[in-house]
Image (cartoon, rainbow, N blue to C red):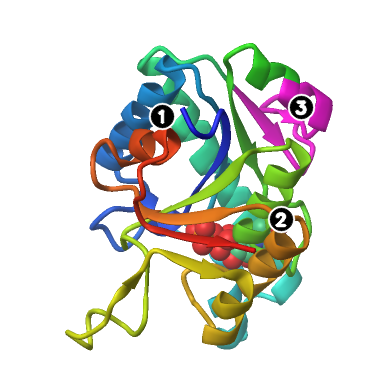
Amino acid sequence: MKYKRSLLKLSGEALMGENKFGLHSTRFQQYAEEVKKVVDMGGQVAIVIGGGNIFRGFPRIKEKTINRIEGDYMGMLATVINGIAFQSYLENVGICTCIQTAIRMDEIAEPFGIDRAIHHLERGKVVIFVAGLGNPYFTTDTAAVLRAIEIKADVLLKGTKVDGIYTTDPEKNKYAKKLKNISFDMAYQMGIKVMDQTAFILGNENDLPIIIFDINKRGNFKKVISGEKIGTMVSK
Ligand code: UDP
């Protein structure tokens, strides 16, 4: 195993599958099975879960219906819904879990705490971080980088529907080439959209490798953890 402790970022987009909105049961089940494969081989897995499949703060602001801060809190609550749902799927495949939230809601989840999170991971529990950073104006990508640094994860894995970063948009240009490795500086200069720029800056400053990979291909999560060169690695 190349990466003993990993942080997996699951975006709302991945969780809604082919749907335009909401929770896609087949996807939740599939991702739970993917996580189980890694846990079964002794990997420590923490997860930051997004909420864009239910609510994203930003587009509403453009519509001038819901204010930015309120919209962002709604987005953070959406991540809690996804986290609770994913907890069920994980437990149903036999994984012990713990949800930690950045916004206190004691009946539902443990408050975020670094030491307790590491304690759970060392005992084989999967920790699901919800409510992002608990602060408006942030995203769950940034939360994922920060949590990964805090729990001293060996790597941050961003599971998406694309299999990495390309020179140009592969859907528009057939000559687009997949990049196996790029530096944080290059990712920043290229204005890569697959992950927030703030996330890349934090990753760079703290020397946290980030791998963008296709989570929908079965077995990929385990392969990345095992050290197979899948997706694109962004590093120093
Ligand atoms: N959000 C926030 N602060 C955070 C994390 C998330 O305000 O620390 C809000 C923000 O409105 C965001 C929404 O929650 O649009 C859902 O998160 P995100 O868009 O990152 O989810 P994903 O793209 O992964 O589905």
Q: Which mark is in front, 1 or 3? A: 1
Compared to residue 198, the image places residue 188 above or below, namely below
Q: Secondary structure at mark 1?
A: helix
Q: Residue 71, located in which quarter of the rendered image?
A: bottom right
Q: Is residue 115 magenta?
A: yes
Amino acid type, mark 2: Asp
Q: Which residue is mark 1?
A: 35
Q: Position of residue 141 (x, y in %)?
A: 60, 59
Q: Is residue 127 magenta?
A: no
**Quarter of the image containing the C terminus?**
bottom right
Q: Which residue is mark 3?
A: 106
Q: Residue at x 40, y 12 (%)?
A: 94
Q: Position of residue 12 (x, y in %)?
A: 45, 55
Compared to residue 63, the image places residue 166 above or below, namely above
Q: Secondary structure at mark 2?
A: loop
> Disc 1 and disc 3: Cα gap in Å?
26 Å
> Disc 1 and disc 2: Cα gap in Å?
25 Å
Give the residues in magenta.
98-118
Dot 1 and dot 2 residues touching (CB under 8 Å): no
Q: Is residue 22 left or right of residue 155?
A: left
Q: Which mark is in front, 2 or 3? A: 2
Judge by depth and name the residue closer to the eye, 168 or 103.
Answer: 168
Query: Which callout, 1 or 3, points at the residue further toward the start of the chain?
Result: 1
Judge by depth and name the residue closer to the eye, 11 or 159.
Answer: 159
Quadrant where ligand 1 appears: bottom right
Q: Which residue is mark 2?
A: 207
Q: Is residue 164 left or right of residue 219?
A: right
